Image (cartoon, coloured by chain):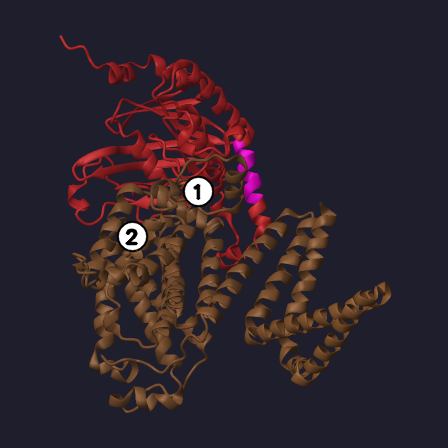
Amino acid sequence: MSEPVLDLRHVTMQFGGVVAVDNLSMHINREEIVALIGPNGAGKTTAFNCITGVYTPTNGQVYYEGRLIVSNQPQGKMKQLYAGTHKEFPKEIVVNTPDKITKLGVARTFQNIRLFKTQTVFENVLIATHLHKTSNLLTATLRLNHKEERQMREHALNMLEAVGLIDVKDELATSLPYGKQRRLEIARALATNPRLLLLDEPAAGMNPQETEALGQFIVGIQKRFELTIFLIEHHMDLVMDISDRIYVIDFGRLIATGVPEEIQDNPDVITAYLGVYEE
Amino acid sequence: MKIFKTIIAALLVVCALFMIYTSYTAKDSLPGLLERMDPQNLAETDSQMQRAKKRVTDGLMEDNKEKTLRGLERYLNGFADKLVIDTQVQYELFAYQNGPSMIAGGLLLLVAGIVLILSAYCKIAQARRLGIHVLLITVLFVGVYILENTVGANSMLMMVLKKGAIYALVAVAMNLLNGFTGLFSLGQAGFMLIGAYVYAIFSIETGNRAQVYQYYAGGLIQFSLPTLVSIALAGLAAAFFAYLIGLPVLRLKSDYLAIATLGFAEIIRAVFQYDGLGPITNGSNLLRKFPVFETVLFPFAVAGVCILLIALMIHSTYGRAFKAIRDDEIAAEAMGINLYHHKQMSFVISSFFAGVGGALLAMYQTTVQAKAFTAAMTYEILLIVVIGGMGSISGSILASFLFVAASEWWLRFLDNATVIGNFKVPLLRSGFRMVVFSVVIMAVVLFYRQGIMGDKEFSLSKLRDRFTRGKGGAGRV
């Protein structure tokens, strides 16, 4: 077995006294589709934000393709306040801003769609090609980079074609129906040339038919771009359908992990979702 | 169609060459023409015509058709000669009087001819579009030049055009930051002040320094740089200060930039008046005797080139990144755009061009004093940006000229007490202009909330579409 694409080790995220993610350790192998599920407020999006650099975790480490991209230990006031269950602290401190992590090959979409509102569909995707530019401000201003510019545009068009939005490319991004906006977010993430794609509730607000189509779409792009996909989702049909493995968290803690069949019958998971019947 | 265009183009070119040629030769050819108009020569022609006329009458009397016709011919020839000389003299005199304008006009026709040929034979759409833009720019410059030569360099119109061009540059620079990158800065006057001072300090001629720095023993700097170098230095100095401010402030994720830049502008104004810096800044005294505008074309050219550079940058991949930051910082960062670097870039560039604008303003005012660069100046420019439309370069340009024209010229009459007959018009008195001006601005902001242009740009093809199709909503250009 080759090394995992993503490897979280004892990641804890604490806001003041609230432990949003507690001692989360997990890994994702190459070209796997892995789902992270859990009730509302379980800390799923916070875990995403720790991976992508939006938050720096209070404690723990994240490896991406064997490379340490995030590492932190409780500092300052947190030394006293720290309430995580894992008390071993890594020595190194590595903090990366989200743009650096995206450049390494980790792209993401957002739970509440975050498109560039004043831009067209095409421009939204084109912006995501900016990170691999080789031109500097001067050469770009004086149009000495026209070759690269043409490649950027071609790449953006390819991505739109891959998600089936090529015929609405000149429309304003916000004028698209909801489902297409979701696809556009995925196209935009793909345009950064990721190897790991993080999808935050891609099916939120979709009806069963749309959700099923989305599932096929995700599997399709996973095959086409040889991606590793890590997704948060509430639609259990979708999750059971497409994931190779599932992690379940509740109150920030990992409560179960395994293939879909195992998770379906896991009593802890059922308790977490439905609550305990107390006599 | 092709042939038609070619013929017109050829005509234009011939006309152009003729105009340029005559304006160069008018001075030399006029004496010869005048010689031909000499009273003696004219008297001779007159007597010849008298004789021809007599022949005609005689021929009629004798019923000799041949004689009559020949006489008539000579008579008319005499007329034609006089007419030709008359027109020629008038034309040459005109060319002599308006030589530079004639050359400019000829140049315009020449460019028009070339562009026409280009549009007829060139298959590359980009080249044709470029040609049309070159033609438009030529029309603008030639038009302004001819205007300057006819209405005079010190007329109100020229003043408005000069100041308008400077404000256009500064407004576009501010729009780059506020409208395109979504960073709110209020330091424009401060950066202009730096630009104006740096320009003045480096470009005062060495011989005049003793006079200007009379209280500071001729000042510290005893050399003088060429105008364009000083202007570039002015921009660089402003950019350097912006970089220093940006270092701490742009790492924060809120509107601290507005507070920091506003404070900076106030502090820098005081610092430049500080007596201890007198040998360089001349303390609170005026800086003067530096090169000023010789023609209105200079601010137009400098501001034009700068605005073109900004526009090219906004339409490059960096401009797209700026707009992404404006629309959604978090998403932009997730797309691999480094927020700090790009904000810093936008801020430094904007300040560079504000500095260049400050240098131009110094040239326009012919003197520089720190006192003039108040926060009110920043608000004027902010107003232009808002009225023109946040995120529209053409809107900012349009609004600057309108703003300057209205505040300096069109609304001036409101400041003069006016009496019509025995009736004294109420309200008109010194200061009323600003009241009306404020009301006008309020109306614009209320009813054109997006500004004149919104975030759209003026474009020829859209204008053409609108004319040919005859539709398209009002207010949406």
Q: Quadrant of the N terminus of chain B?
A: top right
Say whether residue B4 is left or right of residue B189. Answer: right
Q: Position of residue A234 (x, y in %)?
A: 34, 21
As shown in the figure, which amino acid type bears the numbered disc 1?
A: Val
Q: Which residue is mark 1?
A: B477
Residue A156 on image: x %, y %: 53, 38
**Colour that chain B carries in the picture:** brown
Mark-to-mark CA distance, 2 and 1: 26 Å
Q: Quadrant of residue B136?
A: bottom right
Q: In front: mark 2 or mark 1?
A: 1
Residue A36 image-quadrant placement: top left
Q: Say which element carries label 1.
A: loop
Q: Which residues are magenta?
A: A151-160
Give the answer, above or below, for where A143 lies relative to B462: below
Q: Residues within 10 Å of mark 2 (few under 14, many from 20)?
A: some
Extreme residue in the top direction: A279
Disc 2 vs disc 1: Cβ atoms closer than 8 Å? Answer: no
Helix, strand or loop at label 2? It is loop
Q: Which chain is red?
A: A
Depicted B391 relative to depicted B306: above or below = above
Residue B246: quadrant of the picture: bottom left
Query: Foreground residue, B346 or B23?
Result: B23
**Residue A91 circle label:** none
**In magenta segment, residue A156:** yes
The residue type indicated by label 2 comes to Phe
Which residue bears the numbered disc 2?
A: B184
**Front one among B245 and B64:** B64
